[in-house]
Image (spheres, grey):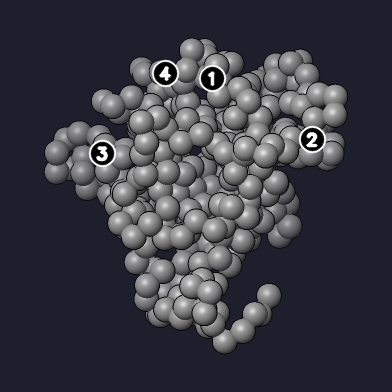
Amino acid sequence: MFRNQYDSDTTVWSPQGRLFQVEYAMEAVKQGTATVGLKSKDYVALVALCRLSKETNALQRKIMQLDSHLGMSFAGLTADARQVCQYLRTECMSYRHAYDAEFPVRRLVTQLGNKLQATTQRYDRRPYGVGMLVAGYDDQGTHVYQVMPSANVLSCKAMAIGSRSQSARTYLERHMDTFDECSLEDLICHGIQAVRGALGSEDSSNLTISVAIVGKGVPFKSLTETENKNYLSIAKKKGNPFTGEEDGQSMDAMSDDEMMDQEPSGSGVPQLDATDASPSGDELH
């Protein structure tokens, strides 16, 4: 994947104004398995596609709990995800020890964005090769944040990252208006359908997923294997995510290449509009 002398480290700009090392880190996210995060008025659901590890023949954990009120799913390098997870857990514990309260979700992802942004400016560091969906619930309500190696932090109503995630984002975009009033069961089913959409023409009969939820009166928890299978069966009864000649591609949805074109935001502060953004060993998972 060598290009030229401008990709030696993150402090070298190409004549076109690009940081190739950051783009390579974004490519690692694109190679990871798909994961989806979406929220309603009262609940947040994370759904991740699980693959077997080639070395251990065991399922890799794609969803990690950070505190009682938030957790994250990831796509990319598992080792980098564990490192970020440990940092976030430490920050949550420190805040709880100092203030006897839960860490506000927006403030936490802002700190994470600042940490990731520092790796895009120093020659002795490399960008983290992992993209994350952080889901949480606090006094401000439900939250889903997309955090990428470029240090962009976006507040979303629903988002999908990972391999072939554009199809999942297309599904989320088409059903986004219904999410606010969804029950927890319907929200999980929408997430599963989005993940199924990311599989494309692959056989989804032996699909293995991980699901985690958090919300009003519901602490963050990962569902058991039996619960995952039950929700998967319910989702399959709803039919295919795309019907007829629909291929899961949308001109309005953000493509993977467009996501790669996002440059570091500088401050790491979550980018907000009047409404939340819509979905437009070192092993990749």
**Residue 13: percent from left, percent from top:** 47, 78
Under circle 4, the secondary element is loop
Separation of residues labelled 4 and 3 (CA atoms): 20 Å
Under circle 3, the secondary element is loop
Would residue 56 be seen by someone viewing this image from the given angle?
no
Under circle 2, the secondary element is loop
Q: Which disc is residue 41 wearing?
A: 4
Residue at x 21% of width, y 40% of height: 96
Pointer 4 with pointer 2, Cβ within 8 A: no
Residue at x 43% of width, y 26% of height: 214
Separation of residues labelled 3 and 1 (CA atoms): 29 Å
Separation of residues labelled 4 and 2 (CA atoms): 30 Å
Which residue lies under the disc numbered 1?
A: 177
In the rendered structure, which disc, 3 or 2, sits on the residue that comes first in sequence?
Answer: 3
Which residue lies under the disc numbered 3?
A: 103
Relative depth, front residue between 97 and 182: 182
In the rendered structure, which disc, 3 or 1, sits on the residue that comes first in sequence?
Answer: 3
In the rendered structure, which disc, 4 or 1, sits on the residue that comes first in sequence?
Answer: 4
Which residue lies under the disc numbered 2?
A: 247
In the rendered structure, which disc, 1 or 2, sits on the residue that comes first in sequence?
Answer: 1
Q: Is residue 117 above or below residue 212?
A: below
Query: How many neighbours does mark 3 have within 10 angstroms: few (below 14), some (14-19), or many (20 or more)?
Result: some
In the rendered structure, which disc, 4 or 3, sits on the residue that comes first in sequence?
Answer: 4
Separation of residues labelled 3 and 2 (CA atoms): 41 Å
Q: Which quadrant would residue 92 be assigned to in this image?
A: top left
Relative depth, front residue between 14 and 42: 14
Pointer 4 with pointer 1, Cβ within 8 A: no
Three-letter residue code for mark 2: Asp
